[in-house]
Amino acid sequence: MSHATVTPKSANSLHGARLPKWFPWAVAAASVALGLGISTVAGLDSSIQWALIASLLFIVGSYAVAAAVEGKRQAKDRTATSLVWVAFLMAVIPLASLIWETVKQGVKVLDGFFLTHSMGVVADQEPGGGIYHAVLGTLEQVGIAALISVPLGILTAIYLVEYGRGKLAQAVTFFVDVMTGIPSIVAGLFILSLWIIMLDMGYSGFAGSLALCILMIPIVVRSTEEMLKLVPNELREASLALGIPKWRTILKVVLPTSIGGIVNGVMLAIARITGETAPVLLLVWGTSTINANPFDGPQASLPMYIYLQYSNGSEAAYDRAWAAALTLIAFIMILNLAARGIARWKAPKTGR
Amino acid sequence: MAKRIDVSGLNAYYSNFLAIEDISMTVEPRSVTAFIGPSGCGKSTFLRTLNRMHEVTPGGRVEGKVMLDDENLYGAGIDPVAVRREVGMVFQRPNPFPTMSIYDNVAAGLRLAGKYKKSELDGIVEKSLKGANLWNEVKDRLNKPGSGLSGGQQQRLCIARAIAVEPKVLLMDEPCSALDPISTLAIEDLIGELKEQFTIVIVTHNMQQAARVSDRTAFFNLAAVGQPGKLIEIDDTERIFSNPSVQATEDYISGRFG
Ligand SMILES: Nc1ncnc2c1ncn2[C@@H]1O[C@H](COP(=O)(O)OP(=O)(O)OP(=O)(O)O)[C@@H](O)[C@H]1O
Ligand SMILES: [Mg+2]
């Protein structure tokens, strides 16, 4: 680094010595180069190793240079900033590489044919076939679960925030807390013993939906509750003071004010349960043919399809598993984007 | 249209805490009554007992009688929702509904309380906005969000919203405390006009404001922190500010305490 661009330190001035804007980038480049160099020399072949060395060099290097030029306080400030950046990269890199890997592997067989055909006439070892039956199953199971959970969850949250006082509300809050922590396999086992073993109902998409409801309701309650609590009390009072009954106040003032956040929470809950595998494995059973009736007989679902194809182990099955995974991620991403869009569209408007 | 309020022996509690004790007073129709007194003496609490908003607060409880003409607001079988349609309220901080346009804010009371004719709505909205001296400023952007107005405009919007349902009484809790002098003046002028139609009760910390806008003034005080607030005296504003009958009132007004 050339020190020529650095203004000299002067004791009695508000102008301290400042490193140029490109300084962090230069240090980053230098530490990456050095990290690569060190690992080649030492014969380390994992990219994680050189990345860690580079991160360390980056933090130490920027502190050392900044301390020498700018002083201790600025150096600490830079260290904090560097730490944040390194942490951010560490969080993003695995995510990005996951998506990259899925896209790379998934596009091989993902096409219109793949999306519109089932595995009915294709043996697992052969190429061909598709995920239509699994997409259909997932959509139906998740759709039914959402249809049950969303109204239940939102109404429960409304009760807790707008009406709930005393023992009953405390009990409900406690149970919702407990339910949030239920592992999905336990929810699946519960429905298995209740619905299939005790009531003798047989495997079906609907049984899977019931287990998904157990997982989804607490998420919806929690997120809706938080959103309702954000609505200022002043708005409720303003509405009540106009002689508007409480239920209309909730319906027309409280809910519209928080609807963006509520929808967002619901979408995230849907995204969360769409990827659930355990209860589906236990209750929906799986099939390679198209079963459009969620109330009768085994159905397929995307997470289970991925699991079954992957455990089959053949090359063609591998490709199909990746393509199904890509479809699942794309579906969840679309849900997320839709949630964001709705949240922005419905957010309380400011500005003229 | 305006109605008389007659309060007798009123106590209000927050759970077990007695906030105001044994208040009796008469508020004349078509007049402005100002409530003054040190912070925490229960002015807001008392105001909120007059339209049954006090019980909206968790633990809020009221004893005593509030007669609106010849009906006791706390009598058996009285619907608090119906009471609030008769007795409107404007709050200290402007609180327009953030999801609604200016038009919808004004129409909210009518639409959501469910008694209006569609054909009359436009007229009522215009009349209320004119009544709140806001019409000229917003007539070109009625469909824009109410939260895009300035603080003073928002407060006048809230007043328009409150008078759109044609209450008999209008309660105002420090309606100008968040506003600049010009908006304050606009609202004070407005109060002067509104009293032709409504019974108005206004809480204020501003002595000049009380002197300017009100016909009668009530002074509240509390013996000590944790003690209930009490009505010390209520009289014509002129008398309260020139020659009050209680020493404490004079001390408070002349700034010797509180
Ligand atoms: N929600 C509440 N819960 C419990 N106590 C309350 C509540 N609101 C007010 N109080 C108490 O009741 C008393 C009267 O309060 P109030 O708000 O009526 O005073 P105020 O005269 O309006 O004061 P200010 O002039 O500051 O607005 C105070 O002691 C206050 O602490
Ligand atoms: Mg107050």
Image (tube, coloured by chain):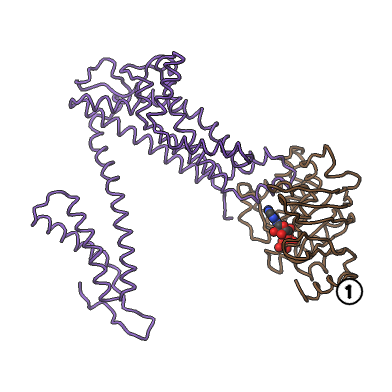
- Place of residue A256 in the rendered image (x, y in percent of width and height, measured from the top left): 59, 42
- The residue that mark 1 highlights is B242
Left-right relation of A268 to B207: left
Point 27% across, 41% down: residue = A98
Above-or-below relation of B58 to A272: below
The amino acid type, in three-letter code, at marker 1 is Ser
- Place of residue A348 in the rendered image (x, y in percent of width and height, measured from the top left): 57, 48
The quarter holding residue A244 reads top right
Closest to the observer: A51 or A163? A163
Left-right relation of B18 to A43: right
**Residue B139, visible in the rendered structure:** no
Label 1 sits on a secondary structure element that is: helix
The quarter holding residue A182 reads top left
- Place of residue A112 in the rendered image (x, y in percent of width and height, measured from the top left): 30, 27
Question: Which hue belongs to chain B?
Answer: brown
Above-or-below relation of B108 to A77: above
Where the N terminus of chain A falls, by quadrant? bottom left
Tell me the purple chain. A
Closest to the observer: B212 or B135? B212
Above-or-below relation of A220 to B70: above
Point 30% across, 69% down: residue = A21
